[in-house]
Image: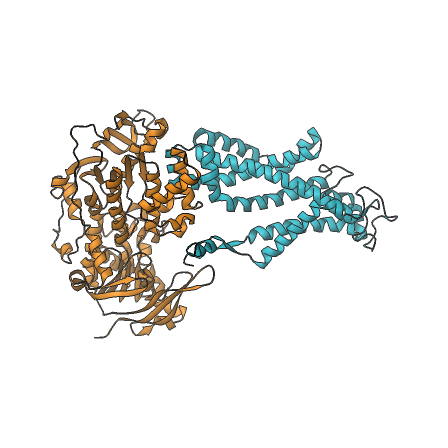
Amino acid sequence: MAKLVEIRGLKVEAKTDANRRIEIVKGIDLDIAPGEIVALIGESGSGKTTIALTVMGYTRTGCSISGGSVTVDGQDVVRMTEQQRSKLRGAVVSYVPQSAALAFNPAKAIMDQVIEVTQIHGIMPAEEARQRAIELFRALSLPNPETIGERYPHQVSGGQLQRLAAAMALIANPKVVIFDEPTTALDVTTQIEVLRAFKDVMRRAGAAAIYVSHDLAVVAQLADRIAVLRNGEVQEMGETVQILEQARHPYTRELIAAFEPHRAPVVLNDIDGRRPLLSVENVVAGYGRSKISSSLLVKAVDDVSLELYRGRNLGIVGESGCGKSTLARAISGILPAASGHIIFDGRELGSGYKERTAQQKREMQIVFQYADAALNPAKSIDEILGRPLAFYHGLTGEAQSKRINALLDMVRLPTSLRGRRPGELSGGQKQRVNFARALAAEPKLIICDEVTSALDTVVGAAVIDLLRELQHELALSYIFISHDLSVVQAICDKIIVMYRGKAVEELAVENMTQPQHPYTQLLFSSVPKLDPNWLDSLAMDRPVVTA
Amino acid sequence: MTLETPSTTRRRPRYQIKLVGMLGLAIIVFWLIVAAFGPHLAPYPIGEIVDQDYFGPMSRDFWLGSDYLGRDMLSRIVYGARYTLGISLAAVTMACTCGVVLGMSAAVAGGWFDSVLSRFLDAMSSIPSKLFALVVVSAVGSSIPVLIFMLAIIYTPGSYRFARALAVNIAAMDYITIARLRGEKMFHIITAEVLPNIIGPVLTDLGLRFVFIVLLLSGMSFLGLGVQPPAADWGGLVRENIDGLPFAAPAVILPSIAIATLTIAVNLFIDNLPVKIRDRSE
């Protein structure tokens, strides 16, 4: 069978500041048949996006294709002139970016942007292109397909914008579409709709696709074949079912194992009627204070109560905008709660952190999602960990140095990293330093706000394992905030589901898989499974949720 | 021990600097040396009339000619460097220290402190700088401390605005939130958390502001309101020898060239600051 895309011995090099050349893609062979969807999967830095972009003859700034050939539809894009390549892009090969929000021009109506490529290449008259766009909108099950194109990008939701980006890519009937992590930034409930629309439209269009993702379960729903990448090399390639069921390469197995976190049996210590470590009663928090009445203009957290006992973990889940992070900020005092009580270790806390005692601040630590933003890039790991030790415990000199080594050891980092700055660490290492800093305070409670969301699956699973070990050693309690159910289920013995600022359901460890509230059911059933038939087996008309 | 070796060599950062930047740096260093060792370098005392001729040409005895009274021009420029560089450096240091400290504090504290300070300094910067300088000097008279303070006051609001704009972005980062939650005092937050992240642009701004101050000081002296005779900075030298212009006397051209070389050199240097070579995988 004729191949549509043939990649042979592809090598891509990047140049460092010091003019040293590093090979980031090391000799890849890859074929794509017409109409076939091939997934490239791997952790960040594995070269998956770089490979996908070479199909358009494109490399990011500082990179260049240094060897091999990429043949698309009989033509080698590596040897093309830039002019020939621009004829190819959009018409034969098109691209769906990770963040459609950044890819759309906010100042132009959506329709003009969707049909732009047909006008640039002179493929079809504008009126015909508009008709075709409306058909695509309908195929992608967008609401109001006739009129949605007249709107501006900020007037549609994130999931809709991602589908509109797909319409933009498909408008000129390309032979290959590159999907670059198109659903990574979406909530699980939205992701389903987008995935379903993609699958449907690709089936109809009959175009081939390269689907770049780090999420094996998402890929399993769409791809015919999967290529597992690591360090710029293909580790394993095969049919989707074969990869999922008979993975040969150890790295693939690790990926699959990380996807289903081996949930260690939660050992529930006795509560025996002691007072809870943290008890939150009827907390209301939000933004903007109305001038007329003293109520809040936007209530992000509306009348939420929860209890957490020492040595236990509480999970808070919900989609973006449900108020889970605001709840964390209210508990930690970053955003003072408008009303309600927060009782920590038997004493009521002031609503803002400024009204709390030094000991109260020390015993409750918060760890943020983005380790990049949480670690000062201008300071060494030594200084970052040394400061809380000096501040809370007055440790200096030799004693401080010993303690830093102990902390790094606790989070399984080598002490040789002490002199480095955060920019010189990997994502997982940074998040570990972030935890080490929280541990330096010797807290009783750590609030983890989406701590694994910015990490690769395998790395994130390792961080969760670490947290579990630390809990054993140090008698900690965690509040775990995440949009990712599997993460929360792996470590928490109680889960609170939030929806539009309210806690809609509380699930204990025994009935964690049998939710009652319709929103929780929707949320739970939206988590992709490693089964390739999972998406098709879902009921088409999913429940509409009203809180 | 062997394990330590790679990390210690890694710690020493290597720098890359462009040729133009090197040239700028060389000229700056040259003028700094001239200013520092002025009395040892000048062949004649500053106020002494040594040439019979006035507006004398360049000669073996008077390398850069003589001025309108027959004083040695080389000595006058060498001494002038002390005034121009000294006053400007003192003023720029004061302006940037005040501006940067206030700017970072306003960004971190926010609220009414930020609003009041920002509006006050906006009002300050709405006064035209030359007009303000003229009024101050004619009111209190001209002396070196007055000049330094006046220049510092004129250039503080700009420095404040610049530092505040940079620090506002830093103050929104999670590591500042964590420092606040820890209960850190304002002084620690601005010096240890914010300043290291904005120091690069702040130094660039300091260089630019230095150039503006040199130019304003020279302009003031040219108008006779700056450094008072018999002492003279470069601007003053241009003014007192302006009558030599029809004779193409070196006495009027050379101080102008001195001002130009210094300001251009500072500009070249800050536009081509050394770049630290970062190579993570090395």
> Nearest the camera: A261 or A42?
A261
Observer able to see residue A322: no
Viewport quadrant of the C terminus of chain B: bottom left
> Nearest the camera: A14 or B112?
A14
Tell whether A499 sits left or right of B118: left
Viewport quadrant of the N terminus of chain B: bottom left
Observer able to see residue A58: yes
Tell whether A203 sits left or right of A394: left
The residue located at (14%, 42%) in the rendering is: A512
In which image quadrant can residue B38 be found?
top right
> Nearest the camera: B230 or A264?
A264
Chain A drawn colour: orange
Q: Is residue B16 above or below residue A175?
A: above
Tell whether B236 sits left or right of B56: left
Instruction: Write down which chain is painted cyan.
Output: B
The residue located at (20%, 35%) in the rendering is: A503
